[in-house]
Amino acid sequence: MNKPRIAIAQVYHESNSFAAASTPLAAFRVLRGAEIPRYYTGAHNEVTGFLEGAAVHGYDAVPTLCAFATPSGVVEAAAFDWLADALVEALRAAGPLDGILLALHGAFVSHNHDNADAEFVRRVRATFGPQLPFVVTHDPHSSIGQAVIDNVDALVVYKTNPHVDMRERGLQAASIIIRMIRSEVRPVMAYRSLPMMVNIVHQHTASPPLRDLWASLPALEREPGVLAASLSLCYQYSDVPAMGNAVVVVTDGNQAQADRIADDLAARLWALREDLDVRIPDVATAVATARAAPAGPFVIVDIGDNVGGGSAADATFVLAELLRQDADGWVVVLADPEAMRACHAAGVGATLSLRVGGKTDHLHGEPVAVTGRVKCLHDGRFEERAARHGGVRWGDQGLTAVLEVQAHPDHQPSYIVLTGTRCAPMSLHQLQSVGIEPAYMKILTVKAAIAWKAAYEPVMTGFVVADTPGATTVNPKRWTYRKVRRDLWGLEGW
């Protein structure tokens, strides 16, 4: 008997409506066919789970197309159109299919589609018809919308932030689709959209006040007939009608069961809203807190320049304050190709004065004048084998230079890592690969929100979140939302 043939695909982007620049097609890495298993083998991504599901469940995985880009601004219309056409064409070219597994982010916005993920699934469903099993995964920083639910058989959302369960969710989606193909289950879904925006500072799934709610999801999935129970954290930097928290429950043919569980989860989440107050210190206070820590490394979270949320990666507010307060033993990473090239031209050991950071837009501060010695030059590539946020094994921050800054002879050296491309702080190997041991530093800075914790928690002694400006500022009052629902809880009270 021939094994079922299941197509494996991914089109993935987290689109920040407030970033200064749009995202072109050139920002996307596109993998086809055999390139996909080569890239994802040994990783911890949902695509890895799709591929591994073949051995677990006895189907033939048919890799088609995977396209992804670092979170950034709204995607250009031409780029979306190319990706949508490429996805459908790759699936068509795969030959006879018994099902489709598709990894989408859930916060993909283009200039021609507020909910680009919904348009991807609409086109796939229109091409292959209503009978072909079609299961999709989402990042919990998603703006789901009814249109996605209407065009897929089941939606599975990661259950952790930092996202360290992506591979498991891929395997879960694979289990659902193979059971559909074998006529063992008939999924139905209940979807609840809440008029609620949980601020990103409360989106660590292992911390209160939402910890117990998230921890209840696996138990729900052990109930007879429940195939998946998911929450959407929402993505507050996406100015689209579907932005907000949501619940999705998938059961085996029992709509009443799905509705009951979805209603209960939605009510429990809504009831927690008064415990979600946001109060975080300004930059000066955050730096002073880090300097006063009895032991390092202490982490300063530059949340306004969260690379994983689509920011510039070159904000200078924290760097300027570290210098102003004469701190030492710190590390700051900046995406600054101009300064990086100057270091490469000067060579290892050279001392030079540069203006670093603050060069992308008007949101992330001004360039800061520094003088230092070029400590290291590197190609910017590194490997992460552990399960970290994003599930990616291979990291690449572009050509990289490390500038050693030492204000006084009796101070511990500090380092500015100048990268050629934006790279989120998902792995300690980002620093270790260029000769910096994070555990030996006094202060580590991360341009992130929650994702950094999976990598940094094992070595840090504590952390503070700084209320920095930028494209990913925690304060929604710094933006003008034009498309979100008017009754959205979480936009008020600032």
Image (cartoon, rainbow, N blue to C red):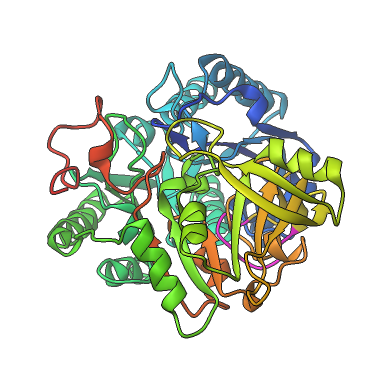
Residue at 85 percent across and 40 percent down: it is: 345
Q: In this view, does 244 lie above or below 299?
A: above
Q: Which residues are drawn in magenta?
A: 383-391
Count how many numbered circles sit on residues in the image. 0
Residue at 68 percent across and 30 percent down: it is: 96
Q: Which is nearer the eye, 81 or 15?
A: 15
Q: Which is nearer the eye, 336 or 156?
A: 336
Q: Let me know if residue 86 is in the magenta part.
A: no
Q: Is residue 423 visible?
A: no
Residue 415, position as x, y percentages in the image = 66, 61
Residue 382, position as x, y percentages in the image = 76, 57
Question: In which quarter of the view is residue 88 placed?
Answer: top right
Q: Is residue 17 visible?
A: yes
Left or right of residue 421, residue 159 in this image: left
Residue at 49 percent across and 42 percent down: it is: 136
Q: In this view, does 269 lie above or below 234?
A: below
Residue at 58 percent across and 40 percent down: it is: 70
Question: In which quarter of the view is residue 201 placed?
Answer: bottom left
